[in-house]
Amino acid sequence: MVPNLSNKLILAAASAIAVVGLVDAAVAAAWDLVVLIGMILGLHVVLWIQLSWGRPAVPLRADLVRWLGDRAVAGGEPVERVADRAVAAYRVGLSGRDSTDAI
């Protein structure tokens, strides 16, 4: 999941609905629902952490995404690694400095 604002808002809304359901189930003493909704909220927390601590999203054109995917499959490596190398090579081409130099 891409960590952008709309995904965070959707997750926040779903979490708020789940909290309302959890409180309602607890008031009604429906303990099986309390456990189920509590587990759902636990998954929401995990997703929230992943959205908050993940790499920042950089929007790309569809043709570049396809190219990255093709290169990743051809090289047998993750798309993220191919993207990192591509950006580093582009930076070297623009600045003339080694990609390991400080910014």
Image (tube, rainbow, N blue to C red):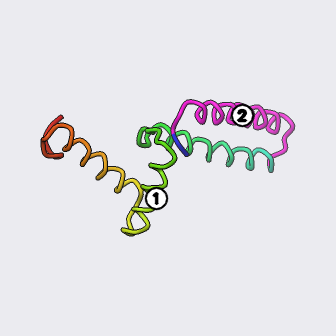
**Disc 2 vs disc 1: which is toward the camera?**
1
Few, some or many residues within 10 Å of mark 2 (<14, 14–19, 20+): some
Query: In what quadrant of the picture does the C terminus appear?
Result: top left
Q: Residue at x 55, y 39 (%)?
A: 48
Is residue 45 toward the left or the right of residue 34 in the image? left
- Which residue, given by chain and number where applicable, does mark 2 sit on? 19
| x then y, percent, for residue 94 | 21, 38
Q: Earlier in the sequence, mark 2 or mark 1?
A: 2
Numbered disc total: 2
Magenta stretch encompasses residue 28: yes
Amino acid identity at mark 2: Val
Q: Check if residue 37 falls in the magenta segment.
A: no
- Compared across the picture, whether 100 is left or right of 47 comes to left
Given the image, on which type of amino acid does mark 1 rest? Answer: Gly
Residue 59: percent from left, percent from top: 47, 38
Q: Residue furthest right?
A: 28
Q: Which mark is residue 69?
A: 1
Q: Give the percent coordinates (x, y) of residue 69.
A: 46, 58
Query: Residue at image x 26%, y 44%?
Result: 90
What secondary structure is the stretch in magenta mostly built from?
helix
12 vs 61, nearest the viewer: 61
Image position, residue 36 (x, y; %): 74, 49
Name the residue: 23% across, 41% down. Answer: 91
The residue lying toward the viewer, choosing from 17 and 75, is 75
In the image: residue 15, left or right of residue 94: right
**Residue span colored magenta:** 3-31
| Secondary structure under the numbered disc 1 in the rendered image | helix
